[in-house]
Image: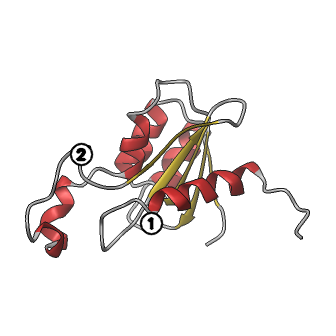
Amino acid sequence: MNDRRLSIPEYSMALAEVASLRSEDPFRKVGAAALDWDNRVIATSYNGLAPGFDAPEGFWDDREGRQKFMLHAEVNLCSLFKRGEAKIVATTTMPCTACMQTLCAYGIKEIYYREVYKESDAPEIAKLYGIILEQVGG
């Protein structure tokens, strides 16, 4: 038996990993989790279409064509809490630039991710705003 307790970054990343399993996107499954100031889970989410929307036949076959309709896991996550309620967000992929801006607007102080997203300005944005942006696993 492993007696080592998961760190908060590892714990939040494990929650994000499980949330990613709900994504219906066959090409990229992204999950996210938010913890409050006491490290309690307040939300989990994943990338996908708007809640309650059923994709038409063949929608998932056109990867390029469907991208503009996809809601990122971080956007879905932020829809589940109010600004200032969450301190930590873990996401299976580094936030894109727009999602990083959204996380800043929601007052997130720590962001953990597994996979690097090279097209993102997240590291530069995190540095300017003094947000912890750290890779966990990967």
Identify the secondary structure beneath mark 1: loop
Q: Residue furthest left?
A: 57
**Residue 137, percent across and down?**
66, 69
Q: Is residue 21 left or right of residue 2?
A: left
| Disc 1: CA contacts within 10 A as few (<14), some (14-19) or many (>=20) | some
Amino acid marked by disc 2 = Ala
**Residue 35, percent across and down?**
62, 38
Q: Looking at the rendered structure, which numbered label has been put on residue 92?
A: none
**Residue position marked by numbered label 2 in the rendering:** 50
| Residue 6 image-quadrant placement | bottom right
**Residue 23, percent across and down?**
36, 61
Taking the spot 73% from the left edge, 48% from the top edge, the residue there is 8
Vertically, is 33 above or below 5?
above
**Residue 11, percent across and down?**
69, 53
Distance of mark 1 from mark 2, alpha carbons?
23 Å
Work out whether residue 107 or residue 50 is closer to the camera in this orientation and state it. Answer: 50
Identify the secondary structure beneath mark 2: loop
